[in-house]
Amino acid sequence: MLWTEQEELMLEQCAGVKSVDYISTAIGRPRGAITQKASNMGISLSLKNSGVNRGPKNKIPQKVIDEVKALLGKGLSYKKISAITGVSKPYVAQIKHGKGARFKSDKNTTQSRTADFNKAFSLMSGGSHENRI
């Protein structure tokens, strides 16, 4: 069965945000069809920031990163900085070398993705997604 533009749009909007089971139910296609179509479209279905596939990815607030940098500037050891801030020693090293800084997600970005998802679902279902799922 061919995919409609609305189904493809919903798959794009849900990928990385919703589980494959959720997408399958929402679109009304089997899990295998969802994963195959995503693969053909070059879309990853791995949930982002959920800990489902690669463990939790805690976002470190900018003020904590700034505190780590200040403590590094004072010459404290990674171990002491880790104890003070709660940031792991390897991550303290990454901050020192300017690599891998993860910041708290911007609420506007999250709200925008949610709005995009709701719009795609509305197009598919002709109404609000809360009514179906």
Image (cartoon, rainbow, N blue to C red):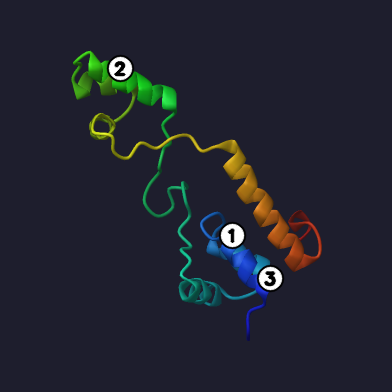
Q: Are marks 2 and 3 in contact (CB under 8 Å)?
A: no
Please, what is the three-letter code of the amino acid marked with disc 2? Answer: Ala
Q: Residues within 10 Å of mark 3 (few under 14, many from 20)?
A: some
Residue 133 shows in the view = no
Q: Which residue is mark 2?
A: 70
Residue at the outermost bottom position:
1
Residue at 29% over, 31% down: 95
Question: Which image quarter: residue 11?
Answer: bottom right
> Between 7 and 86, which is closer to the camera in this rendering?
7
- Evaluate if marks 3 and 1 touch, with contact meaning CB atoms under 8 Å apart: no
Quadrant where the C terminus sits is bottom right
Spot the residue most to the top.
74
Q: Which residue is mark 1?
A: 14
Q: Which residue is mark 3?
A: 6
Q: Position of residue 121 (x, y in %)?
A: 71, 61
Q: Which is in the foreground here, disc 3 or disc 1?
A: 3
The reply to whether residue 109 is in sight is yes
How far apart, in angstroms, are the residues tagged by discs 3 and 1? Answer: 12 Å
Looking at the image, is mark 3 or mark 1 earlier in the sequence? 3
Q: Is residue 44 above or below residue 30?
A: above
Residue beneath the point at 74% across and 57% down: 129
Give the residue type that dot 3 points to: Gln
Secondary structure of the residue carrying numbered label 1:
helix
Asked if residue 110 is positioned above or below residue 26 in the image, the reply reads above
Give amino acid for label 1: Cys
Query: How far from the left and from the top, in percent, is residue 104?
Result: 48, 34
Residue depicted at 31% across the width and 22% down the height: 68
Residue at point 57%, 64% (across, down): 12
Q: Determine whether 112 is above or below 23 in the image.
A: above
The secondary structure type at the circle numbered 3 is helix
Location of residue 115 in the rendering, given as x and y in whole percent from the top left corner: 68, 50
